[in-house]
Image (cartoon, rainbow, N blue to C red):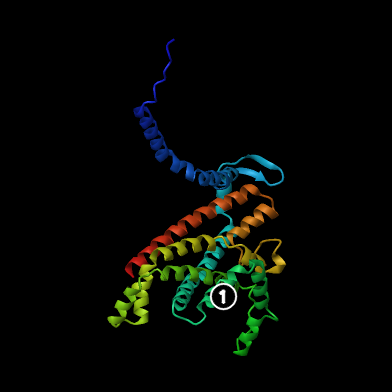
Amino acid sequence: MALETTSPPSPVGDRDKRWLLARLDGKYTPYLVIAPFFLVFGAFGLYPLLYTAWVSLHDWQLVDGDQGFTGLDNYATLLGDANFWNALFNTLSLFVLSTVPQLLAALGLAAVLDRGLRGRTFWRAGVLLPNVISVAAVALVFAQLYGRDFGIVNHLLGLVGIDPVDWRAETWASHLAISSIVMWRWTGYNALIYLAAMQSVPRDMYEASMIDGASRWRTFWAITVPSIRPTILFTVITSTIGGLQLFVEPQLFDPGGTATGTGGSDRQFQTLVMYLYEKGFRLFDAGYAATIAWVLFLVVLVVAGINFSVARRIASKG
C-alpha cells in the first residue's frame, strides 16, 4: 500500500507573501491611520461648509424651508446692505484693537515669566486663570465695570477729572471696552504658548550675547523673537480666526440687547457673527445668514493670509 506524502510549503512562496504583505502594509497603513480624521472632518467640517454654500444660493427660511433657488441674489443684496458693512467695520475694528495689543502684551509677559522668578509656577498658572473662567461670567462682570452711572471705570476716570463715558452708546468707547475683555481673557493663554517656545531656545545663545555686551532688550529682539518665529506665526493665525469671529463678548456686553443681537441701540458694536445670529435665529432667514457665513469665511481667509505674510516678513527681518 502506497503512502501519500505532502510536500512542505515552498520557502520561496512564503517569502513572496511576506514581501507582498509588507509592501501593502507600508503603502496603505498610513492612509488607514489618518482616515478617521478625514472622515470626521468630512462629516462635521467639509459637509456643513458645502451645505451652507448651497443654502446661501436659496431663499431658505428656517421655519418654512427652501423657497426656491435665487442664485447670487443673496450676495448682491448683502453687498448693498449698510448693516453688513457696519458689522464688517466693527469686526475689523474690534479685531485690531484686541489682537495687536494682546499679542504684544503676551510676548512681554512671557519674557518676564521666562526669568527666574520666585514662585514662577504660581505665576505661570495664574496667567491662565482668565481663560478658565466662563466667558459669560467675564463679560457680565466687565459689563458692570463699564456701567455708565455706577461703573468702577467711570468712577476712576472721575477721580482724575474725566467726565463719565457711556461705554455702550459710543462706537469707539464700546470697542475699547469689548477689546479689553478679549485681551483680559486671551493674553495669558498666548503668553504661556510663547513661554513654552522661549524655553526651547538654547541658553548658550543668551550667554554669548551677554559676553558680547548686548542688553536684555537687544537680546530679546535679536535672539528670542527670531527663535520663536513659528510660534508667533501660529498665534497670529489663531488670533485672527478667533478675533474675526467675536460673538459672546459683544453679545453679553449689552445685557439689555442680548436677545436681539443688534449690538447696541445703533448697532455700534454689532459684529458679523452677531449679524448672522440676528438674521438666522431671530429673523429666521437661513439663506441670508448662510451668505453672511460664507462672506465671513472669505474675510477670515484673506485677513489671515495678510497677517501671516506680514508677521513672517517682520520675524525674518528680526
| Residue closest to the eye, 211 or 51 | 211
Could you tell me which secondary element the residue under label 1 belongs to?
helix
- The residue sitting at the front extreme is 1
Amino acid carrying label 1: it is Gly
Image position, residue 121 (x, y; %): 52, 76
Q: Which residue is mark 1?
A: 126
Identify whether 230 is placed above or below 33: below
Q: Quadrant of the N terminus?
A: top left
What residue is at 65 percent from the left and 85 percent from the top? 155
| Residue closest to the eye, 209 or 3 | 3
| Residue closest to the eye, 176 or 200 | 200
In the displayed structure, does residue 11 sit left or right of residue 268?
left
Identify whether 202 is placed above or below 43: below
Image position, residue 122 (x, y; %): 55, 77
Q: Quadrant of the C terminus?
A: bottom left
Identify whether 81 is placed above or below 2: below
Q: Classify residue 114 by image quadrant.
A: bottom left
Image position, residue 311 (x, y; %): 40, 65
Q: Is residue 181 visible?
A: no
What residue is at 36 percent from the left and 32 percent from the top? 15
Q: Classify residue 132 by image quadrant.
A: bottom right
Q: Is residue 297 visible?
A: yes
- Label 1: how many Cα within 10 Å (few below 14, some 14–19, many 20+): few
- The residue sitting at the top extreme is 1
Image position, residue 127 (x, y; %): 55, 74
